[in-house]
Amino acid sequence: MTLHWKLVIDATDPHGQADFWAGTLGYLVEDNSPLIERLLALGAAPEAATVESHGRLAWRDLAAVRHPGDPYEEESGMGLGRRLLFQRVPEPKAGKNRLHLDVHAGPDRRETEVVRLEGLGATRLHKVEEPGGTWWVLADPEGNEFCVQ
């Protein structure tokens, strides 16, 4: 039996992180507004738990991105495949990541992608050149390291 999974990332600005990673990966920011509107109408969620993002209601403390080709639940907007969920935490990132993403651009597009990602808010940290390959280590807008190979 296989399990569905998502990668959950702590963030001080979940919506900013979702926008950055959607732009980085070509993913879609999930639209949870139908579910939120239904829960608000039933009195099952407080309005204080929501914000407006991309012109629609969103959860204040959660934002997710999903692969555009993967299935999703229409009634909730939640992705059922490749997905990153950003959850608000009060403290900023401290220390090195214990887990990170590798973005595969290939040697011919690597530098172009690094420049594009810097335009989205990434910071170039350092280049790694080893017998097994070459890649750039970058940080997203909240300082989470990731590699562009």
Image: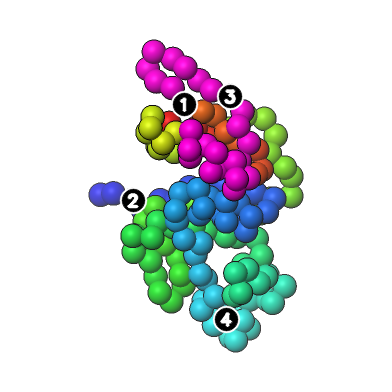
Amino acid type, callout 2: Leu
Of marks 2 and 4, which one's residue comes earlier in the chain?
2
Marks 4 and 3 sit apart, C-alpha to C-alpha, by: 44 Å
Q: Residue at x 54, y 75 (%)?
A: 33
Q: Residue at x 52, y 58 (%)?
A: 64
Q: Is residue 98 above or below residue 119?
A: above
What is the secondary structure assignment of the residue under circle 3?
strand
The disc at residue 3 is 2
What is the secondary structure assignment of the residue under circle 4?
helix
Marks 2 and 4 sit apart, C-alpha to C-alpha, by: 29 Å
State yes or no: residue 125 in magenta.
Answer: yes
Q: Residues within 10 Å of mark 1 (few under 14, many from 20)?
A: many
Q: Is residue 68 above or below residue 99?
A: below
Q: Which residue is mark 4?
A: 37
Q: Residue at x 50, y 54 (%)?
A: 22
Q: Which residue is mark 1?
A: 135
Q: Residues within 10 Å of mark 4 (few under 14, many from 20)?
A: some
